[in-house]
Image: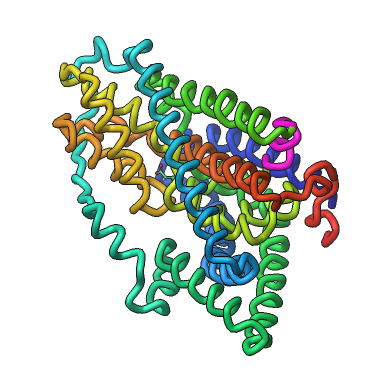
Amino acid sequence: MKKSNLTLKILLAMFFGLVLGGILYNFNETSFVDKVIVNGVLDLLGGIFINSIKMMVVPLVFVSLVCGSAAIGDIKKLGRVGGKTVLFYITTTAIAISIAFGLASITNPGKGLILENLAKAEYKVGTADSFFNILKNIVSTNPIKSLAEGNMLQIIVFAILVGIGISVLGSKVEKVKNLFEELNVLVLKLVEIIMLFAPIGVFALITKTFATLGYGAMFNLGKYMLTVVFALIIHFTVTYLGMLTVLGRLNPFKFMRKFMKVITVAFSTASSNATIPVTLETVQDDLGVSKGISSFTIPLGATINMDGTAIMQGVATVFIAQIYNIPLDLGDFVTVVMTATLASIGTAGVPGVGLIMLSMVLTQIGVPVEGIALIIGIDRILDMCRTAINVTGDAVCTTIIAKTEGEFDNEVFENEVSKISQIA
Ligand code: ASP
């Protein structure tokens, strides 16, 4: 199967899922269709797809990061790449949230809305770990437990250490090095095979989401939703495509064409973490980024770089503050930018986590956290959109860093046929 065929199939699957989901929404909760099709067959197919890519996350991140850091070898280079990555991620997040604030101050999504008319729901406040605790806890006391729990930051630190150890010991641990390299080939192959089922998985996930939510949810709170979506689009086109063109000197359309399948998986799973295997496979095999760089920057990005989430938080903050009639000043904006950026470091890229982070942000500037209840109903749809932006941000930064490090293969980038086409 040609790669473009697979991407096209996934896109068609998404489209049909959207249409069928809207139709199935009209069936009663106790109906046969709802019980057997939506919560039976679709739930099963979508669940198997999500589970099978999640199954690959920990082995892939661990094995490829060990190989990557063993290959980089030079600790100075590792530190330089790490520093650049974090700087890139923080800068793009700050740009994202500024776009969100700018746009929300123009559209004023919460002005004129009367609180009593909006649905009242309970929202439990999330608690934030202190910044120093987050830093302390990136070093695991039990790596096996970290692997079992999928604690990404701890896995990253442990894998880097193992990689450095392998590189320092050199020929003494040749067999261990070879073992990791062969395991790396194996897990990547498994990801490619799983991706062949992506059209079915994506179709089932999207159909089920819209069969449960319907389209109606999108029209309530329309201004808020549109502001978030518009800010996401601006960040995508101006920041990302601009960075690729100016800093990366790459054709952004080629990049996007190759990256499309990752976007669809992120959209349908609403989880950057679950998307890691597909993101890694694509940046390495289709975009031409070296394993050494991407195996480090992609898992790190999925955990600490959430531009789409930051955009939602910026707009939501303005929206909720306006509803409660609380004026925000420049100091509040700065606090939101800092809290949102730091909060994203300690939280994993899984569905719905953005709302928990939002509760930390609102607490910091004294806006009632209960306001989150107003946007919960439609959050899933926005979660899907912002996750697509989150993973794109990781890949764009990764590609540019790889270019600056001379770890980018232009031939692979220019090539239209990807590896995945060779296994089908
Ligand atoms: N679902 C998002 C992600 O995985 C996080 C969020 O905004 O809730 O990237």
Residue 282 visible (yes or no):
no
User: Is 183 one of the magenta-colored residues?
Assistant: no
Figure check: 109 above or below 377:
above
For image coordinates 59% across by 60% down, the residue present is 295
For image coordinates 34% across by 33% down, the residue present is 313
Q: Position of residue 32 (x, y in %)?
A: 49, 49
Q: Magenta: predominant secondary structure element?
A: helix
Q: Which residues are magenta?
A: 251-260
Q: Residue furthest front?
A: 76
For image coordinates 24% across by 10% down, the residue present is 112
Classify residue 209 as left or right of residue 245: left
Q: Position of residue 124 (x, y in %)?
A: 19, 45
Quarter of the C terminus within the rendering: bottom right
Q: How is the image coloured?
A: rainbow
**Residue 141 position by quadrant:** bottom left
Ligand 1 placement by image quarter: top left
Classify residue 106 as left or right of residue 51: left
Q: Position of residue 273 (x, y in %)?
A: 49, 55
User: Is 256 one of the magenta-colored residues?
Assistant: yes
Along the viewing direction, whichever of 240 and 198 lies nearer the viewer: 240
Residue 67 visible (yes or no):
yes
**Residue 395 position by quadrant:** top right
Classify residue 88 as left or right of residue 311: right
Along the viewing direction, whichever of 250 and 72 lies nearer the viewer: 72
Q: Position of residue 84 (x, y in %)?
A: 51, 47
For image coordinates 53% across by 58% down, the residue present is 47
